[in-house]
Image (cartoon, helix red, strand yellow):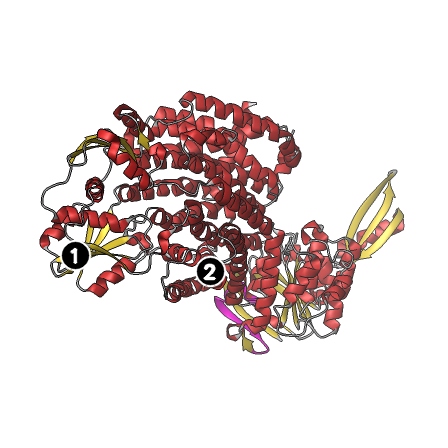
Amino acid sequence: MITVRELYHDYTGKGPYAVRDVSFSIEKGEIFGFLGPSGAGKSTVQNIMIRLLGLQRGQILYEGRSIRDMDARFFNRIGVSFEHPNVYGKLTGYENLKYYAGLFSVPTQDPLRLLDAVGLKDAAHRRASAYSKGMKQRLVFARALLNDPDILFLDEPTSGLDPVTAGTVKHLILDKKRAGATIFLTTHNMYIAEELCDRVAFLHEGQIVAMDSPRSLKLRYGERSVAVEYEEDGQVKKDIFFLGNEGDRRSLNDVVAGKNVQTIHSQEATLEQIFIKLTGRRLA
Amino acid sequence: MLGRYVSLFQQDLKVTLRNGFSYVVLILAAILVAVVDFAVPSEVKLTPTELFVDLTEGRVFESVLRREGVEEARILRSREELTREVEKTRSGIGIVVEGDLENPRFTVIHQGTEAPENLNLLDATLEGLVRVMRGAESPTGSDIEYLRPRAGATPVPFNKGLVPLIVVFEVVMFGFMVVAVMVFEEKQEGSIRAIRVSPARPLEYILSKASVNVLLALVYGALVVTFTVGPGVDYPRLFLLIGAAALLMTLVSLSVAVFFGNVSEFLFVAIVFMAVFSLPMVSYLLPSFAPAFVTWIPSFPVVFGVREILFPTGKEGFLAPMVGMVLAETAVFLAASHWAVTRKLMREGR
Amino acid sequence: MLRPIANLVRKDIVKSLRDNIVIYVLLSPILMAAGLALCLPSVQTASLTFALDAAADPRVIEGFKEYGKVELCETRQDLVDRVEKLDDVAGVVRKGDRYAVVVEGNEASDVGAATRAVLDRILAAGTLAEIERVSLGRTSPMLREMAASLVVFGAILIAGVLIGFAIVDERETGVIRALAVSPATMLEFISSQFVAAGAVSVVVAVASSLILMGAGADYIKIVAGVSCAMVLSIVFGFLVGGLADDQIAGIAVLKVVMLPFIGIPIASLCVGARYQWVFYPFPNYWGFQIFRDIFTGESVLEFWGSCVVTLLFGGAVIAGLAPTLRRRLRLR
């Protein structure tokens, strides 16, 4: 279990805090999503959790042990996939993984098998500088899996990927979860979060404004609505009716009874809409 | 520890080679070897050139000068020609001899910027020449004691004498830029972030980079030395000294480079550092120039050490203290680079 | 055409100010010139050092001071240790009422014989020869002038490095592709580099000349000479910028190109007038001649002659390189 308590971080030493009073905990085997727009403080929290940034104030505990007491062996247990692909351009994909694997003192996975899993088998022996952005992204993801980590930190793991490849990566993430890994996923992509995360936390201006499972968040903050397309005066019109609203319910009845309805869809509120409702800002 | 070091070393070596530094070493070694072997004359005089005109009866001095090894071009015909040459060469000193051996009269035509001590020394040398020509013994009976047998019976040719300079100020300094460049590339690619979240420790990171550069220096040095001085060199001792010095240079560079953002920023600071480290070059070419601050520069003893290894004069027991000294300096910079890498490279933020 | 150039120049200046590069570029050669100015007097007047037996006659000790630096050693072992140090120092020990010269045996010049000659001269009564000195009355040592011409030539090199790395940076970040789809032409690109780097090298050249030569140098010629030799900076910069795809490769190319660029002028200083023709095929030799003429008054051609040859030669090299560069930088 990972516990984060009252975390603060100040980059300049003169304020304001980039992260304020952030507390949450992640159960073993859980996928925990950290959602927020750019600059909300997501990466700051993650960077403190992976010791890229020093812990200034607050507590981070891994199975009850403070991150301050961890030595370099801590990194044997974690895997990090960075948002911006950071690989050695002069080395091939295979070499990037091979040499990185040599840095761990725990058994590591076969680089070729991992490359195959992320669809880079054919490009394994090409220099990474010749990879497309998406290929580099997958290489970074594969690198994060090398040491079979119990805790995986994923920063926008599917950004820049085509839908098919993004699907492959999502499957791999779920595989890791099934194998018992704890996954901390940072993203501003609400669909990924909804699809993968057991729980999500909304981060806004360095603070957590809401935290729960996507379903509970929707139940608590979301309103179900119905979108209807109908014909009026020779033109197609579209209206959304919120079912929790008495007036909207009446209007919907009128439209269905009196107009020529072409399509009708019930829709749930998205995490994006909830985020806007809570913060007044969009996620992306 | 060893496994991680080996992995990092293999990775750094491969990246360095793919960056074309192996070709750079080969091309530079070829150019330098060609310059030493074919372009630089075996005899060059760096101290002021004395030019002579012998106007004594029977030109008694000329033949002695020739016997002493003064080349033909430095013995002129007339006072006017001499004055013209001295004015033109700017580093020349003209000496006109008149009278006869019993009562010689010298006129020293000099630039006006020479140290008075050196002109006095020239006077003494001229009188010494007269004394030798008269066949007179030293009036004081002064002997010259050699601390070691004179190995310099055949002096080292000027062009070969440049090899220690090349080894120390090019080969050993090569790593100074390369190691910085390796760090900047990792910063720019972001690959350093992956190292930061791996179990690799700063010491392993530093030693891996240093090893690659030491290896490059050894290969570079071996190429230059073998094709200039010849294969009969005491390689183990040469490698020991080059290796220690290259290690030191790498660590100095690493201690400084991590504070900069990119090569362009660091480049000009590196030039100043390298210029300071190259100052002992002057002492090597002009041995009487050795002010205390120059002797403190780490490359000062090393260049003379390399000369002793390449052209032995019989000096014993100099290598161990010299390598010891370099390694002590290395230890200081290992600590400095460890601090700098831990603070500035392995962490982000404040 | 002028507006795009002005814009490109402004962009280069703002960029290098943000990187602090301008500060380093300006500071490093000026620091070097200052360092040289401090060291040169002691190089120029470097005289022999003698390690004397402290028991020597005061007349001998005082006498030696007229021929060089004197260090006194209390014991013979101290004296031997001093002689054995890395520099060329001869020792003089007293043996009863006689003296002996102590040398290592590996000294570069015949230090031993010179020291004995001094000793003889001090101890002998009367002189063996009449020696008269005639000074040509120069005040500025040649070494200083040579150093000044090399440092100012170095300013040209620094401008070249600046241009080269600016191009490498633009290629690496992909900005050059934005330029390639802008109306900027190859000529405008070259001109902007010329202006930006030219300004830097003029400042560096003037500042380092001031430090080394004082106000007496011909600054109009220095500025004119630097402006002409800038064509070499462009050649240098374009070689680095054209051949290297990233900064790392930039350093690799720099290492290789710098050797002949700075090595040829230095070598030409060591080679006599008879063999100077060997260097004629190199444009940087002619660029260096400009500054040799300014500072030492020695050059193969006069000042303007060297300027014209440098411009023509450098221009021809740029013209030769242009098609390759245009292709590599994807400019029109």
- Range of the magenta residues? A49-64
Give the structural element (helix, strand or loop) at label 1.
strand
Q: Is residue C213 above or below residue A23?
A: above
Judge by depth and name the residue closer to the eye, A234 or A22. A22
Which residue is more in the foreground, C278 or A188?
Answer: C278
The answer to whether A81 appears left or right of C296 in the picture is right
Where does residue A50 sit, x and y in percent of width and height?
Answer: 57, 66
Q: Residues within 10 Å of mark 2 (few under 14, many from 20)?
A: many
Height in image: C208 above or below A183?
A: above
**Count of numbered circles on the image:** 2
Instruction: Return the residue at label 2.
Output: B238
Quadrant hosting residue A94:
bottom right
Q: Is residue C107 magenta-colored?
A: no
Residue farthest along the bottom direction in this orientation: A64
Q: Chain of mark 2?
A: B
In depth, the one of C292 and A23 nearer the eye is C292
Q: Amino acid at mark 1?
A: Tyr
Amino acid tagged 2? Leu
Question: Which corner quadrant holds the N terminus of chain A?
Answer: bottom right
Residue hosting label 1: C99
- Whether residue C75 sits left or right of residue C252 in the image: it is left
Mark pair 2, 1: CA separation:
39 Å
Q: Secondary structure at mark 2?
A: helix
B255, above or below C216, in the image: below
How crowded is the residue under tag 1: few (<14 C-alpha within 10 Å), some, or many (20+)? many
Residue displayed at 54% across by 25% down = C315
Residue A63 included in the magenta stretch of the image: yes
Identified at 61% across, 62% down, the residue is: B10
Chain ID at mark 1: C
Q: Is residue C207 visible?
A: no
